Amino acid sequence: MPAPALFLVSGLTLYLGAAVAVGLFETLGAPTVSWWRIVLAAVVLLAWRRPWRRRWTRADLGHAALFGIALSAMNIVFYVAIDHLPLGVAVALEFTGPVAVAAITGRGWRERGAILVAAVGVVLLAGITLDGDVPRDDVVIGLVAVFCAAACWAGYIVLGKRVAGGGSGFDGLAVGMAAGALVFAPFFGGSVVTVVPDVGLLAFLLVVAICSSVVPYVLDQVVLRRVGTATFAVLLALLPATATAVGAVVLAQVPSWPELVGLAFVSGAIAMTATGRD
């Protein structure tokens, strides 16, 4: 299956899972929902891959663990962001991470110019959000969270390529998710007494984990084996439009025309980094 088609499936499942997660924020809180997404995804991946059968080097384990911690941190702060910002806006702003990766790993004028184009989109989206109906405190928290998520996403792309290139692939993903779950357990593990006895809540969290973690990140590993880091960042340009569509249909977060212009600038910035090489 072509890489763009894989990304379409990845994006749809990723943001459908996020839309389901938003409905759970009032029950558990956004960071806790995200941690459970990581935990349950780790359980599914460990049961599927059984990575302990593999012969690991210390370096491979270290890379997989760092990859998983970056991934987990990205998920947690992103859920904080979408608790305070519209889904499409949050995803577009988070794309400053992949744009930075594409610009740094590329060499041409397009990659450098993409930073400026992305900056215009970010200023538009941030300004519109600040002047919109969302309370200013929510906007500030959301913007801080989403730019932290962008930094984590950049690390996820770089480390993910190293994990995929090292041959550990899905096994590295399973180990990484388990490492991320353990690192953040001291902060969110107290919710076990609330979640485990509630079968319905646990089922919804499992749906979020499969849709937003297992399916998209497995597909990411498949694509990362085929393409380079810069190209991978470019393909991620398919996701802002997907997030906006899911937000509009599922969460009734219909974007305004100025927001659509900002989204177009961000997606255009990522497209500019496509130079036909890995």
Image: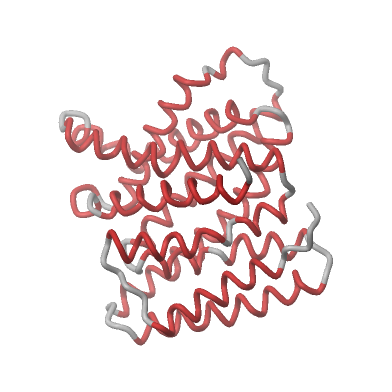
Q: Residue 269 appears at what percent x and percent y?
A: 64, 72
Q: Residue 123 appears at what percent x and percent y?
A: 52, 82
Q: Residue at x 72, y 66 (%)?
A: 273
Q: Residue at x 34, y 39 (%)?
A: 36
Q: Residue at x 67, y 42 (%)?
A: 224
In the picture, residue 195 is in which quadrant? top left
Q: Quadrant of the N terminus?
A: top right
Left or right: 137, with 103 as reference point? left
User: How many labels were placed on the picture?
Assistant: 0
Seen in the picture, residue 47 relative to 145 is either above or below; the reply is above
Given the current orientation, which residue lies at the most extreme top position? Answer: 53
Given the current orientation, which residue lies at the most extreme front position? Answer: 1
Q: Residue 190 appears at what percent x and percent y?
A: 26, 37
Left or right: 59, with 21 as reference point? right
Left or right: 259, with 66 as reference point? left
Colouring used for the render: secondary structure
